[in-house]
Image (cartoon, rainbow, N blue to C red):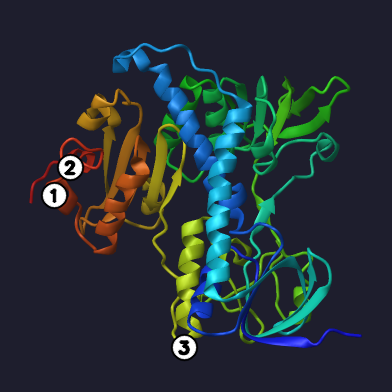
Amino acid sequence: MVDPVEEFDLLVVGGGKAGKTLAMDWARSGKRVAMVERGMIGGTCINVACIPTKALVASARAMRTFARARQLGFVTETPEASAELLRTHKTGVVEGMVTINHKQFVDSGMDFMLGEARFTAERTVEVTLNSGGTRRLRGAEAVVNTGTTPLLPDIPGLADARVLTSETLLHLERLPEHLIVIGGGTVGLEFADMFAAFGSRVTLVARGTRLLAREDEDIAQAVTSLLAAGGVDVLTHRSTTSVQRGADGRIIVALSDGTVLSGDEVLVAVGRRPVTAGLDLPAAGVRTTAAGFVAVDDRLATTAPHTWAAGDVAGSPQYTHISLDDYRILKANLAGGSRSTKDRLVPHTTFLTPELARIGLTESQARAAGHQVRVARLPVAAIPRARTMRDTDGLWKAVVDARTDRILGVALLGPESGETLTTVQTAMLADLPYTALRDMIITHPTMTEGLNLLFAVLQDYR
């Protein structure tokens, strides 16, 4: 006997930030809502991405602080990172947030279920429940929010070498003596820096001629120098030609220049792929791109009527704060609005120690777009707060339109940069000239006060 189709006002497939927020919002307003999640209550961010990794970043920063203990005026025994205690710390943070999310789901009044969803028609899914049995659901509106998963490239031997991804690395039972990181993007850099702080020997292999290809050369070089000073051996302009795990458990990584590396663990961090393969989206009339992402327009509408997609799976920039903005767009458009993803001012932070925060155009991008630019650079050592913390590594850079005095973009490499970035973002959204930040009275001594100094580099008081 075929299960009857249950009707809902909103069907959400995947419980990422956009989907779960919209589902709770609609359920609290009295609408009938169903949300299907494969297994990670709260989504990727809480379980295997932002939250657990940043919990471990906090631990790595503590290790860095211990390293300069005498400079700060205290004597302590040399600390030693414990894989068991790090895992306990990370798990405690994650489990606490999962519990909060689950309670919010239940309290909202939505029909929340764990299972695998497969589309059988427009806005209609069959769900194989993790607890057993099946359900058939149909929504007047449907949202796909299934996220992404780590990508494993087609490198000879890789599939059989039991390598780590950004997700499986979180479950390590011991700290590797030598961790080889394949990938020079944000995820690879964060883990390389983190494990170097924990005491592992770390080698980072990147295909590009330098790290952070989207940043200007001076910022990329400053990041490379910081990683090297922190114990990371950075190898650029090399591709990985093979990966083999030997009978002794060691992993041999061969590079395109003939270099052969031997380590006890390899982390592959070369990007993520969309979770769409098992959804049977064609049955729902939903088209995907060549890379498997759900094809959407600037309103996040798919090719099927009353069917939407949000977050990573829709090809949005892969940040939780963007998924939250996707929720705002969906909320507005489902209510008859016309909110768009066009021209979003997207901030992001790479959580190194110290961190790199970025918004807007780089100098290279600004010049390529035809802007006449003025550039301000400030060593972090010039900021009084950094000196009080004995945390003076880093470089701040701002790009300003020479004709309008508007801020086109900044890159802030230094302590607390992610927090400072919001002040710049607010000025850019308000269309303020750089002189507003140069002349603003800012609490002393704070890292944000460095914006006075950064923009004063441009000198001409108007």
Which mark is in front, 2 or 3? 3
**Residue drawn at x 44%, y 27% as measured from the top left:** 62
**First of labels 3, 1 by sequence position:** 3
Q: Which residue is mark 3?
A: 336
Question: What element does badge 3 sit on?
Answer: loop
* Marks 1 and 2 in Cβ contact (< 8 Å): yes
Disc 2 to disc 3, how far (Cα)? 43 Å
At which x and y percent is residue 181? 65, 32
Q: Is residue 93 above or below residue 180?
A: below
398 vs 23, left or right, is left
Q: Which residue is mark 1?
A: 440
Residue reaching furthest right? 1
In the image, 351 versus 430, the foreground residue is 351
**First of labels 1, 2 by sequence position:** 1
Disc 3 to disc 1, how far (Cα)? 40 Å
* Residue density around tag 2, few if under 14, some if 14–19, many if 20 or more, within 10 Å: some
**Residue drawn at x 55%, y 85% as measured from the top left:** 31
Question: What element does badge 2 sit on?
Answer: helix
Which mark is in front, 3 or 1? 3
Three-letter amino acid code of the residue under disc 3: Gly
Three-letter amino acid code of the residue under disc 1: Met
At which x and y percent is residue 371? 32, 56
At which x and y percent is residue 387? 25, 25
Residue reaching furthest left? 462
User: Is residue 211 at least partly visible in the picture?
Assistant: no
Q: Quarter-wise, where is residue 162 in the image?
A: top right
* Residue density around tag 1, few if under 14, some if 14–19, many if 20 or more, within 10 Å: few
Which mark, by number, is residue 452?
Answer: 2
At which x and y percent is residue 68? 37, 17
**First of labels 2, 3 by sequence position:** 3
